[in-house]
Image (cartoon, rainbow, N blue to C red):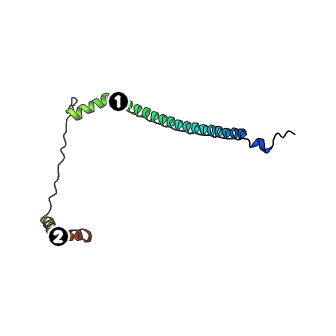
Amino acid sequence: MNNRGSNSEIYSPRSVITMVGLFFFLFWLLYSIASFLHESRKVQTEIEEIHATNQKLKNEIEEKKQLLAYLKTPERLEKEAKMQMGKKLPGEQVIVLVEEKLEILPTEAAREEVRKIKEEANWKKWQYLFLN
């Protein structure tokens, strides 16, 4: 009698080793696929970040080119010559505005109050700060 699927053949050392080997091979294969997918997502994220940075830098370059074009215009050069060097065109007058500096001096009463606070104990200063 030939029992091809009997329990003794299924649990033989050779078939158990084959099953364990197959299990580890499948586990390794799934791990490799998962690792590859994870790495490809990381690479894709980095590529997207690089594209965003690239676009940002292109925009900055365009802004700098526009600023440079503006700075090279004759109107801008004339304005700078007038502002920095006091140059003027024939028939123009230069007017200089001087800003007055106002100084606020404390009154005698304010000075007296500051003097009293400096002479008091530290806890009284805190009390004055929070309660007055």
Q: Which residue is mark 2?
A: 121
Residue 63 location, x and y as percent?
A: 39, 33
* In the image: residue 116, left or right of residue 31: left
- In this view of the protein, which residue sits in the foreground, 27 or 2? 2
- In this view of the protein, which residue sits in the foreground, 92 or 98? 98
Is label 2 in a helix, a strand or a loop? loop
Residue 118 location, x and y as percent?
A: 15, 66
* In the image: residue 131, left or right of residue 58: left
* In the image: residue 34, left or right of residue 47: right
What mark, if any, has residue 20 been given in the picture?
none
Q: Quadrant of residue 58?
A: top left
Is label 1 in a helix, a strand or a loop? helix
State which quarter of the image contains the N terminus: top right
Instruction: Determine whether 103 is above or below 37 in the image.
Output: below
Q: Are marks 1 and 2 in contact (CB under 8 Å)?
A: no
Residue 90 location, x and y as percent?
A: 21, 29
- In this view of the protein, which residue sits in the foreground, 45 or 92? 45
State which quarter of the image contains the C terminus: bottom left
Three-letter code, disc 2: Ala
Residue 39 location, x and y as percent?
A: 54, 37
Q: Which residue is mark 1?
A: 68
Instruction: Determine whether 119 is above or below 8 in the image.
Output: below
